[in-house]
Image (cartoon, rainbow, N blue to C red):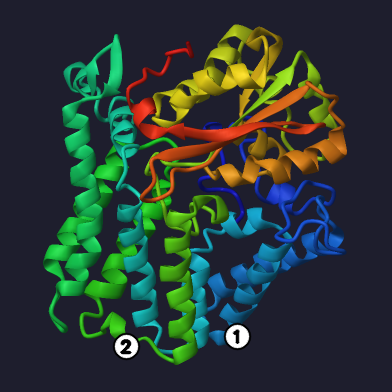
Amino acid sequence: MLGLGCGSGPLSGRYLPPIGGFLYFLRPGTTRLPLFPGLPLIGAPTRSLLDVALYLGLVAASLRALVAPSPELAHFLPIVVLLGVLGVLDKTIFLAARAEHYWVTLVCFVATPHWIAGAQAVQLALWFWAGVSKLNHHFPTVVCVMTSNGPLTRFPALRRRMYRDPPSDLRPSRLATVLAHAGTALELGVPIAFLLTPLGTPPVAAVLLMLALHGYITSNVPMGVPIEWNFSVVYGGFALFWAHPEVSVTSIAPLPLAAFLAAMLVALPLLGNLFPSRVSFLLAMRYYAGNWAWSVWLFRGDAHRKLARLTTSSAWVYDQLARFYDHPTAVGLVGKVMGFRMMHLHGRALPLLVPQAVDRLQDYEWVDGEIIAGLALGWNFGEGHLHQEQLLAAIQSQCGFEEGELRCIFVESQPLGRGTLAYRIVDAKTGPRAQGELDVADLRSRQPWECAP
């Protein structure tokens, strides 16, 4: 929640300063995304002194628990309450805290002294839903892009084999598709193996599968994946299952905790997979499947300079990079974000959507929504809902773009069991301009650079 993990550094579009997080959350006037926008006191688009005080209290409570010789209910309860309240005031902080994992586990600590079974349920849900989220045609593009860019897979022959016929055909090869399916099976197999291990028996097979899964992920150093989170999950596998083989996940008690976990670990992820526009991909546990909501922000001319009216700790991304590079080099670096987006299956929608958004792309500055969220909110982690209409409205209320100065393309995730991606094109001042759905089967046949007829 400090913004030191997945929300810092060049992958988040931050150079000077290299972090956002607490530099925003402790600063009045910065932009926030309330759960109930427009309501008095709690629905304002900018941070108040009350927000800052509550966040500071959460940091203090967390530090108090970390240094306690033996943390107990009195240490955990303030964290649970404060993070819950802050989640209503600003969804960004709740997501930055990785609440679907850590906050839910803290609730188990608060609800019962016999919390092992509840924490096991959280861990099993993380693996299971991450596997379910990869039951689509997006994940093979993730594998081919990840493996062909991994720092430990610097073998030209292997990198070429990730694609059908590089550079003329950059669709995933059969090898990439097989690896993707194997990874999905492994991710689903880990929780099943833990569940099938007889009570009282060390889960040797399950632990080996777990180490294979997270070892593969970590060794690829995939873009946007918090490596520290993978280590935390592996530690949890040993601390919860290997160290307590006598505890069954079915022994969760009391009943209110079981009901809470059923809602957070079953109902909410299921809803997020079936209706991804309504639930954050983090809360739905749809991790690194390539099936993300995302956006592109198009600024006409130098209209992006109006973003300076926001209260931020980060400058315009090119102004940050100007400290290190000449402008063409900076454009090339930021262009890698565009390249990363278009190499994935969903990004192949852009050549179809950009002509609907603007008449001449040459007149516009192309910025991925991730960069905008990092600048305006202080945190971004592939959560496209952070940089959709709510953020656009908050920025427009502070910056006042004229018609045509800022156009946004918003694309949603593909729902489980359906074959389309929904999109919207919005002008900052005049509102919606177009909306519709794209056939995923059509995107699978396209190249990253293939333009509309």
Q: Secondary structure at mark 2?
A: helix
Residue 69 visible to an observer of this rendering: no
Residue type pointed to by label 1: Ala
User: Which one is in front, 52 or 198?
Assistant: 198
Mark number, residue 251: 2
Alpha carbons under labels 2 and 1: distance apart? 24 Å
Q: Nearer the viewer, mark 2 or mark 1?
A: 2
The residue positioned 49% from the left and 63% from the top of the image is 100
Q: Quadrant of the N terminus?
A: bottom right
The part of the image, by quadrant, that contains residue 254 is bottom left
Among all residues in the image, which is located at the extreme bottom? 254
The residue positioned 42% from the left and 32% from the top of the image is 439
444 sits left or right of 15 in the view? left
**Residue 407: x, y in percent?**
71, 26
Residue type pointed to by label 2: Ser
| Residue that numbered label 1 is attached to | 74
**Residue 322: x, y in percent?**
67, 16
Asked if residue 210 is positioned above or below residue 177 in the image, the reply reads: below
User: Which one is in front, 60 or 382?
Assistant: 382
The residue positioned 47% from the left and 41% from the top of the image is 292
196 sits left or right of 250 in the view? left
Asked if residue 425 is positioned above or below residue 404 in the image, the reply reads: below
The residue positioned 26% from the left and 13% from the top of the image is 166
Q: Residues within 10 Å of mark 2 (few under 14, many from 20)?
A: few
Whichever of callouts 2 and 1 sits on the residue coming sooner in the sequence is 1
Residue 443 visible to an observer of this rendering: yes
Asked if residue 448 is positioned above or below residue 283 in the image, the reply reads: above
Q: Secondary structure at mark 1?
A: helix
**Residue 395: x, y in percent?**
79, 38
